[in-house]
Image (spheres, rainbow, N blue to C red):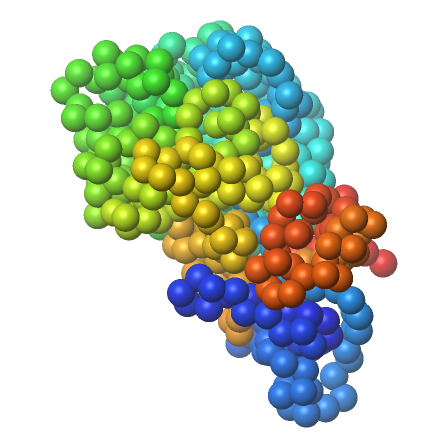
Amino acid sequence: MHAYRAALLNFADDGSARYEEDGLLVVGPDAAGRKVIRAAGAYGALAANYPGIAVTHLPGRILAPGFIDLHVHFPQTDVIGSPAEGLLPWLEDYTFPHEARFADHAYAVEMAEVFLDELLRNGVTSALAFCTSHPHSVDALMEASERRGLRMMAGKVLQDRHSPDGVRDDTEQSLLDTEALIRRWHGRSRLGYAITPRFAPSCSEAQLRGAGDLAASHPDVWIQSHVAENKEEIRWARELFPAARSYLSIYQDFGLMRERAIYAHCIHFDDEDRALMRDTGAAAAVSPTSNLFLGSGFFDYEGALRVGFRFGLASDVGGGTSFSPFHTMLAAYYVGREGQTKPGISLGPQHLWWQHTAGAAEALGLSGVIGNLRPGCEADFLVLDPQATPLLARKVRNARNLDELLFSLIVLGDDRVVEQVVVDGVSTSRGGASAA
């Protein structure tokens, strides 16, 4: 076992943050040999319980849970910052041509390393990721994630229509490939598979039906897709599936709404859609930098909280403009203030941070496993330097309470705040290599 002494940030069951100015975090193996949090709390209360244990002292630092990215496109790393008039032109002009390059296995392997370096540099220790329609893109990401000890959930994109050559797949083969990838990767090390229809308009009824059959056969895998992001996209989906009550209900009609189903965006919803999310246990991946960048709209936090369905934060790189959870949390704050159907709500800094950690874990069905620093959680955590920049240091010194401290980090923080990343109990450099 090993212990770390620093300030300690974690979350209670109600989503509120708990902060110990002088905390102790003890990491060690559980009965199955996994590296987990053995104890977390005030140094004065815990230190005597662990005589002789090696302690790393980190004065002035904060230990916090590793961030979770609920929706990110691994093959779109180089698409960040590509200008377009909106979602559909952006897909046609940038995304599909770039994803076609992943037909080259060597390129997929190279980009997997770049992608994981960026996640870790920004303090993201778990992610739910889209790959491309090429099965070896999943292999490349999973192999690299396993080597680094990351908890990664990912899947091959399904898109057998309304897609250009180079990314369009074959219906029957795409389902056979998905089944094979589930058997190869799901539950191996810290990896999980996600059945991944790109979005309903890109999939034939036969492909969606097959995806639903696979989901029924493998109830512990994840499901991920997009829904209700853009009004033109919604119009298109309704034309293609005229019998469906709404865009979201298309997925329900094909057996793709359940626990561990994560739908990105969920912007243009009515209360029936929100109730369907709640009643099936599905969750929304809120992607504020992407929605702002592509002009798609605003996630309705008021509606989500009122009806009561799960949600968490996501970068949505490359429509999203940053891998940084700090940038994503700040954008979510803007959306909460300005983007509601009713008068705006002010999302507090504790709630924003919860959305990217323990709340995202809850959305994934992984509460008590990742996203927190409580006994039994896997040992993924960050060493944060609240004095990483002069202005941030000045602001933090003047913080009168926890909300002001956390909000200072959200507004002024970036990857420079992430001093060290610990993944599965092993300290890494911010680029992902094991630290000496």
What's the residue at 34%, 43% (across, down)? 302
In this rendering, is residue 252 above or below 21?
above
**Percent position of residue 305, x then y:** 32, 49
Q: Which of 247 and 163 is in front in this view?
A: 247
Quadrant in the picture for residue 83: top right
Task: Name the quarter where the N terminus is drawn.
Answer: bottom right
In this rendering, is residue 106 above or below 195?
above
**Percent position of residue 290, x then y:** 52, 28
**Percent position of residue 293, x then y:** 54, 23
Quadrant in the picture for residue 210: top left
What's the residue at 40%, 40% (across, down)? 344
Q: Which of 278 and 391 is in front in this view?
A: 391
Task: Name the quarter where the C terminus is drawn.
Answer: bottom right
418 sits to left or right of 243 = right
Q: Which of 51 and 359 is in front in this view?
A: 359
In this rendering, is residue 249 above or below 90?
below
Q: Nearer the viewer, residue 223 or 136?
A: 223
Can residue 324 be seen by looking at this rendering? yes
What's the residue at 42%, 26% (across, down)? 297
In this rendering, is residue 142 above or below 81?
below
**Percent position of residue 310, x then y:** 35, 49
Q: Which residue lies furthest to the right in this view?
A: 436
